Amino acid sequence: MPIYDRKWGDEDDILNAVYDDPNKALKVNIVSGGVVNPTSITHGSVTVSTAGTAVPLATSATPVSKVVTIIADINNTGLIYVGNSSVTNGSGANPGFTLVQGASIDIYIDDLSKIYVDADNSGDKVYFIMT
């Protein structure tokens, strides 16, 4: 059973949680620092020029501070598949997360270039916005 000890100060707020069994000691220090909100947003679009060939949302490392939202174009003629570099469309061996026209997904990740999309039809596209 954990024992809680709270220490509140001007500079650091600390909560210690320690199990009373010395053989199973677990100490947790939570130091408050506040939430840092993103200061900017980035947006863009990616077209799958050849169905069956995954396309990255960015061709070089592009840091993401919080989340990427991806939405399939409402005028697409087929499905979009979202995943990593090995994602395929519905005909392939590794179809990713499927988006119908107008559907979206939020992905919490550190780098936009790690997200790939593929499509059932050449020319279909996605839009993204990130913080």
Image (cartoon, rainbow, N blue to C red):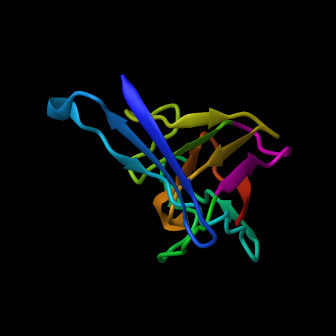
Give the left or right position of residue 30, taking residue 130 as reference.
Answer: left
Q: Give the residue displayed 77% in from the left and 37% down from the top.
A: 103
Q: Give the residue displayed 29% in from the left and 39% down from the top.
A: 26
- In this view of the protein, can residue 124 be seen by the observer? no
- Where is residue 21? Give x, y as percent: 22, 27
Q: Quick one: 95 or 6, which is closer to the camera?
A: 6
Q: Which residues are magenta?
A: 67-78
Q: Quadrant of residue 44?
A: bottom right
- Where is residue 124? Give x, y as percent: 70, 51
Relative to residue 79, is residue 125 depicted above or below?
below
Relative to residue 93, is residue 48 depicted above or below?
below
Q: Give the residue displayed 66% in from the left and 57% down from the top.
A: 68
Q: Is residue 71 magenta?
A: yes
- Where is residue 43? Give x, y as percent: 75, 69
Going by the picture, which residue comes out furthest to the top?
A: 1
- In this view of the protein, can residue 47 be seen by the observer? yes
Q: Quick one: 28 or 126, which is closer to the camera?
A: 28
Q: Is residue 8 magenta?
A: no
